[in-house]
């Protein structure tokens, strides 16, 4: 009557406003959920001590498929299709494992967005450029390539007990990578000329073939000691199936990725580096033969499922 709204009218208008607002947000939420539900992410990983499997899991949600590269190679499965395809692998000498290299050369990846996360422990050098070159030559251009520092499991140079004490800010780095992927960021981590020269120096020192990376004769580089109890874990965790449990004990043969899954996962620490003072990779032996490592979030069964060639 005097230009003022009655209490009843005010409540009616407030109720109508709330219903309209709720409907609007419900529709927006449904649209977002629907879109998110349609987006499928597939992550391909190679793991030896669990670091890369842990990273792959951290970058996953309910609509993510995790696929082990050793299992894909065993199945000869190379056709992968998703909205987003990622690959997570450890760098060895700044290069991808040989099996990862061979997989990408055979793979037929179909996705609108491709990303790669490369884990390392001390020096990454030009790992990003190396992967970009290998993948492009195989016909796969990756939109996003980044590195992630983690525990370094290279026994000739590092004591695992000391490595595990270092705070490398892994959760923070993972959070940033996850945010980048959520935004489908197009970016390659920059590489300096100094890093390129460091890699060149390492290759000259190690005498490795840049087209193969680490692919070594297992019998030349590893030995099984009398501490072996014949549990067969080494046979289950080797991604190349180089170990065999026989009536005479463990038999080892074949080309090795140098992933060290066998050494780190042996419960008796019965697998050791062979001694060869003239080989640049073996001249130092092991910094601490009694220290071994597996990512604290990953079980031995996880490694077996990822790598077993049985």
Image (spheres, rainbow, N blue to C red):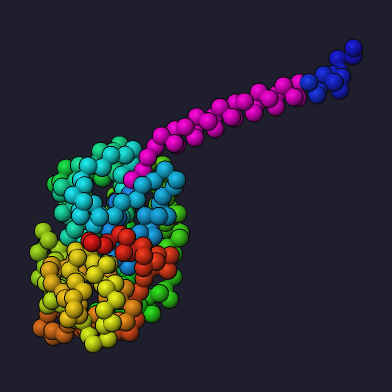
| Residue at 36%, 43% in the rendered image | 41
Q: Is residue 33 magenta?
A: yes
Q: Main secondary structure of the magenta part?
A: helix
Q: Position of residue 138 (x, y in %)?
A: 15, 46
Q: Residue furthest toward the top? A: 1
* Numbered range of the magenta stretch: 13-42
The residue lying toward the viewer, choosing from 299 and 220, is 299
Image position of 240 with respect to 114: above or below: below
Residue 142 in view in this figure: yes
Q: Residue furthest toward the front? A: 247
Q: Position of residue 285 (x, y in %)?
A: 21, 84
Image position of 99 with respect to 259: above or below: above
Q: Position of residue 22 (x, y in %)?
A: 64, 28
| Residue at 45%, 45% in the rendered image | 62
Q: Residue furthest toward the right? A: 1
| Residue at 27%, 70% in the rendered image | 261
Which quadrant does the C terminus fall into? bottom left
Q: Quadrant of residue 227?
A: bottom left
Q: Is residue 248 magenta?
A: no
Q: Position of residue 125 (x, y in %)?
A: 24, 63
Q: In the displayed structure, does residue 287 sit left or right of residue 218?
A: right
Q: Quadrant of residue 19?
A: top right
Q: In the displayed structure, does residue 243 sit left or right of residue 10?
A: left
Which quadrant does the N terminus fall into? top right
């Amino acid at each position: 009557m005097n230009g003022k709204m009655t209490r009843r009218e005010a409540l009616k208008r407030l109720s109508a406003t709330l219903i309209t607002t709720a409907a609007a947000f419900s529709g927006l939420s449904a649209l977002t959920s629907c879109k998110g539900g349609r987006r499928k992410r597939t992550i391909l990983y190679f793991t030896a001590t669990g670091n890369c499997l842990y990273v792959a899991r951290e970058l996953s949600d309910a609509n993510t498929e995790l696929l082990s590269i050793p299992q894909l190679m065993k199945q000869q499965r190379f056709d992968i299709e998703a909205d987003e395809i990622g690959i997570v692998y450890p760098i060895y000498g700044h290069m991808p494992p040989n099996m990862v290299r061979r997989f990408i050369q055979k793979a037929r990846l179909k996705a609108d967005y491709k990303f790669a996360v490369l884990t390392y422990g001390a020096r990454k050098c030009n790992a990003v450029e190396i992967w970009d070159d290998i993948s492009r030559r195989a016909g796969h251009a990756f939109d996003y390539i980044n590195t992630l520092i983690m525990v370094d499991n290279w026994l000739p140079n590092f004591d695992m007990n000391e490595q595990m004490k270092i705070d490398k800010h892994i959760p923070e780095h993972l959070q940033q990578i996850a945010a980048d992927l959520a935004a489908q960021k197009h970016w390659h981590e920059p590489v300096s000329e100094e890093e390129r020269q460091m890699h060149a120096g390492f290759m000259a020192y190690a005498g490795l073939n840049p087209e193969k990376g680490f692919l070594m004769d297992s019998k030349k580089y590893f030995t099984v000691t009398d501490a072996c109890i014949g549990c067969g874990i080494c046979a289950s965790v080797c991604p190349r199936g180089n170990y065999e449990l026989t009536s005479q004990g463990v038999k080892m043969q074949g080309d090795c990725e140098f992933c060290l899954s066998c050494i780190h996962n042996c419960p008796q620490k019965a697998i050791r580096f062979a001694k060869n003072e003239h080989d640049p990779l073996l001249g130092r032996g092991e910094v601490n033969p009694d220290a071994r490592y597996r990512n604290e979030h990953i079980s031995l069964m996880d490694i077996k499922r990822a790598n077993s060639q049985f």
